[in-house]
Image (cartoon, helix red, strand yellow):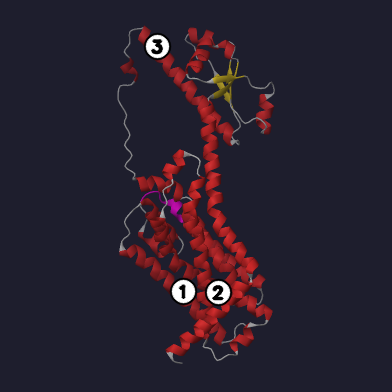
Amino acid sequence: MRVSTFFSAALAVLAKEINDAWRDKRTLRMVVLLSVIQAPLVLLLVSTLVSEREQRLERRELYVQGIEHSPGLANFLARQSYALRTPPPDALAQLASGSFDEAVLVIEADFDAKLQAQQSPTLEIITNSSSRRSSTAREQARSLVQAYVQERLSLGLALRGVGLASLQPLVLQERDVASAGSRSAQLTGAMIPLYVLIAVLIGAMGPAMDSTAGERERGCLEPLMMNPVSPWALALGKWAAVSLVAIATATLTLFSFIPAQWLLHSEALQALFQFGWREALLCWCVCLPFAAAVAALMMASSVRGKTLKEAQAGNSLVQLSMMLLPLVSLLHDAAEPAWYYAVPSLAQQTLMLRVLKGQALEPQHWLLPAGICLLFTLAALAYLSRALRAKAIA
């Protein structure tokens, strides 16, 4: 078969697969909708959680039981501009049930007497660690108590003529050498690479199953094979269509993070979340070979199934493997090992993290993952064309 004839046949199959995918508007709308709203929903959730924490800290309220037993502590809290609230009588039961999500500072009756006698009185903070807001209030109460203890200790030493410098014989300074991109990647790196990789998997899975096991189940794959089309041209055309859908899904997900930043209410998050057109374009380039490899692997897995259910079972294994591989990066907190770039999915996550951190990308960083994805793509397409040629789906 001549090259021009081969590519003409592959383009004809590609047009046919795109037309079939376009007819299934319900699935297409669902994929597009998930891709577009995924980023806004995630950022809105993160923004809501952070804003809730900031508002809790700005309210400067503290629930105290027995504050009348310590006028000194009451004076200290008032000077810190904290409003003291009385907890409900059944605060312990409400905390346990989750209906009361604050922290309660309990002061014992002989608190001041023990302080004057230079004994060690007890302050108790009652919280529910399963409640996020209660944990935030606990940290707030703990920092206030520590500040009060430090103040009393400083005043006591000053009254005895002891210099305050003796409390702190050295000065501890911290220097953060992380770049602005690295600090930004602490937030963006936790979500953008993961959601983009998931978008590729979701975008490829449906068309890969429909163009192989789905057509076989409907009985329209065998008539297609009766046409004078090379199995390689048939496999190439179907693979190109599935790859285009996977790339389109990843593109919508990736670039939707740019306008989604408008939903960030917290100024701290707005300063931390640095993701622009340059980062989106570079991450998109990283995803291209991965989308091609995933499309080919899922088609090779689906071609063995006689029904969509059988194909879904096989593709679930591929999808799960690609989603779990990035978790390997949790084992290394420093520089990533070189072998990361040889593992699909893990390599793409590592590359996107480098982009988000603003780190330089050497040629080997791009070429090795792209080459590995190309090998997976060619191997999967070879298996797919051989299955079609041998009528393994019959």
**Quarter assignment of residue 133:** top right
Q: Which quadrant of the figure has residue 101? A: top right
Q: Indicate the quadrant containing the C terminus: top left, top right, bottom left or bottom right.
A: bottom right
List the residue tagged with mark 2. Answer: 299
- Three-letter code, disc 2: Met
Left or right of residue 332: residue 10 = right
Q: Residue at x 44, y 58 (%)?
A: 349
Residue corresponding to mark 3: 155
Q: Is residue 279 left or right of residue 22?
A: left
Pointers 2 and 3 in contact (CB under 8 A)? no
Relative to 48, residue 61 above or below = above
Whether residue 98 is situated above or below residue 329 in the rendered picture: above
Q: Position of residue 289 (x, y in %)?
A: 43, 68
**Residue at left offset 53%, top offset 86%:** 231
The magenta segment is 327-334
For badge 1, the amino acid type reads: Thr
